[in-house]
Image: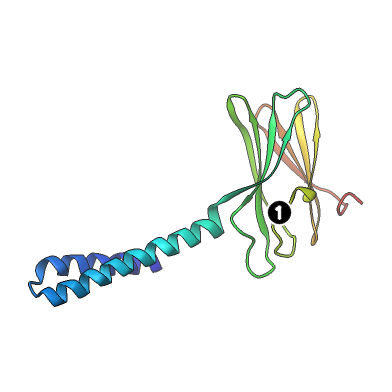
Amino acid sequence: MIFVIAFIATFISMLCCKAIKKPAVRVILGMVAFFNILIMILAGSFIYTTKYKIHDVASYTSPDGKYELLFQQVGDPDWPFGHTHARLVLQDKAGTIAKYSFDIAADGANASSDLCQVTWKATQVEAVISGEEQNDNQYILYFNGKTESNQLDTRFGI
């Protein structure tokens, strides 16, 4: 919503800048347009950082070296004390095979490699994700691109 308002104000300021002949008014409208653009850039970078930026948490390579599993945090945890948004990405030399997005109930903490335990199998990789306020979740990413998830009855493997 802030982007729409700032865009409209900037657009109107720029149009008025062209139409109005008085230099003082043109300077003021130009400054309004400049500050609106600055606000849009700052708000956009804040939203990108908190909602969409990918933070690599850990990387796990298969024993044969063909596959790599990336554990990534997406944005920042919800404020205050909310879920951490994360994803698992299975890759090979050719590119991405599978992605699985999920939330971690970890009391607003950032994701860390301590929350993920990885087991490599012949046709899949299994990742168990733990959180302070949730049971463990098992995510299975198959080498053919399929994904699967299971909620376990354990917490931190216990």
Picture layout, residue 58 above or below residue 120? below
Q: Please identify the residue farthest to the left as the structure is shown.
A: 21
Quadrant hosting residue 109:
bottom right
Residue at image location 10% in from the left, 72% down from the top: 20
State left or right for residue 112 relative to residue 35.
Answer: right
State left or right for residue 72 relative to residue 4.
Answer: right
Residue at image location 78% in from the left, 37% down from the top: 126
State left or right for residue 55 relative to residue 13.
Answer: right
Picture layout, residue 154 above or below residue 3? above
Residue at image location 76% in from the left, 33% down from the top: 125
Viewer-closest of 48 and 131: 48
State left or right for residue 117 relative to residue 69.
Answer: right
Picture layout, residue 31 above or below residue 83? below
Quadrant hosting residue 31:
bottom left
Q: Secondary structure at mark 1?
A: loop
Q: Position of residue 78 (x, y in %)?
A: 63, 64
Quadrant hosting residue 17:
bottom left
Q: How is the image coloured?
A: rainbow
- Other residues around mark 1 within 10 Å, as few (<14) / some (14–19) / many (≥20): many
Viewer-closest of 144 and 30: 30
Q: Position of residue 95 (x, y in %)?
A: 58, 29
Residue at image location 64% in from the left, 61% down from the top: 77
Q: How many marks?
A: 1
Q: Position of residue 122 (x, y in %)?
A: 79, 24
Q: Please give the residue where the numbered disc 1 appears in the rendered image.
A: 111
Picture layout, residue 156 above or below residue 60? below
**In the rendered structure, which amino acid carries the disc numbered 1?**
Ala
Quarter of the image with the N terminus in it: bottom left
Q: Position of residue 101 (x, y in %)?
A: 64, 47
